[in-house]
Amino acid sequence: MKEQPVGFLDSGLGGLSVVKEVKKLLPRENIEYFADNQRQPYGEKNQSELTKFTFQIISFLLKKKIKICVIACNTATAASLKKVREYFSIPIIGVIQPAVQDAIKKTLNKKIGIIATEFTTKNGAYLREIKKVAPEIKVFSNFCPKFVSIVEAGKFTAPETYEVAREYLKPLKDAQIDTLILGCTHYSFLKRVISDIMGSGVILIDPSISTSLTLKEVLIQKGISKEEGESKENYYTTGLTDKVRKTAKIILNSDNIAIQRVKLEELG
Ligand code: DGL
């Protein structure tokens, strides 16, 4: 079982922020990563579409013999974590809970900001999780629709990225939050821009870090952590374009990333 891979899914390349952290923390683990680029953005989809996509992708990854699955997507986590956990027998980890715990530990002025997709923001998953643990905390949120395509295009620090980010972050700056949750895995790649705009007084909470720590804990606790040998990685996408290839190479810092195209019909 230890040799079996860890599965990851996202609407695109955002979940690679989680993969990058996992590779640092658990360098021997085999990885199967699924990016649903053809149906992106997930942030504009509804609950039943997102639940269907998550079921389809986990079923696909199970054929690759994954031992555990990380939903490296806040939107899919918000829409379907509870349902997929009830249905599948492998352990499934989402990105929201680990980030909330981290943010609550870090805030001093009890004002937390959340930036996420439209679905995650309107669904209120972060707000509910925070209020469950710390009802006294004030929560401010905003959705940032253009960030996903900016990241997919690899424009991590472009002038237009700063321009768009200034607009999205203004209400959170005005609210004087001291902690900001990057509630979409794509936003992890915009940390530099976000931190330049928010200033050094605001701590950024990147779910990819807390999620990889949670993954490690679960693997150890279940006795299924792979601690020896080489790591193998496979990447799949429903929408293989030159842009996806190019940005994946930049993110993973490798020229030899083979990404396989999966047709939507194959997902059943
Ligand atoms: N990366 C995803 C998330 O964490 C979804 C981005 C999108 O496709 O809208 O929510």
Image (cartoon, helix red, strand yellow):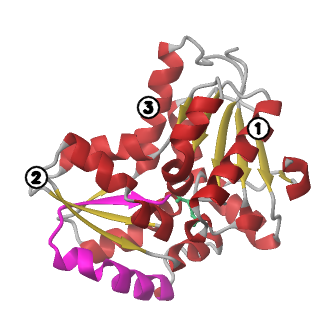
User: What is the count of numbered marks?
Assistant: 3
Q: Quadrant of residue 65?
A: top right
Q: Which residues are magenta?
A: 160-184
**Circle 3 is placed at which residue position?**
214
- Residue 229, visible in the rendered structure: yes
Residue 9 coordinates in the image, percent (x, y): 65, 47
Quarter placement of the N terminus:
top right
Circle 3 crowding by C-alpha within 10 Å: few under 14, some 14–19, many from 20: some
Per the image, label 3 sits on a secondary structure element best described as helix
Residue 28 coordinates in the image, percent (x, y): 64, 26
- Judged left or right of residue 250, residue 99 is left
**Is residue 171 located in the magenta-colored stretch of the structure?**
yes
Residue type, label 3: Thr
**Circle 1 is placed at which residue position?**
59
Q: Residue at x 9, y 57 (%)?
A: 109
**Circle 2 is placed at which residue position?**
108
Residue 220 coordinates in the image, percent (x, y): 50, 16
Q: Residue at x 43, y 33 (%)?
A: 213
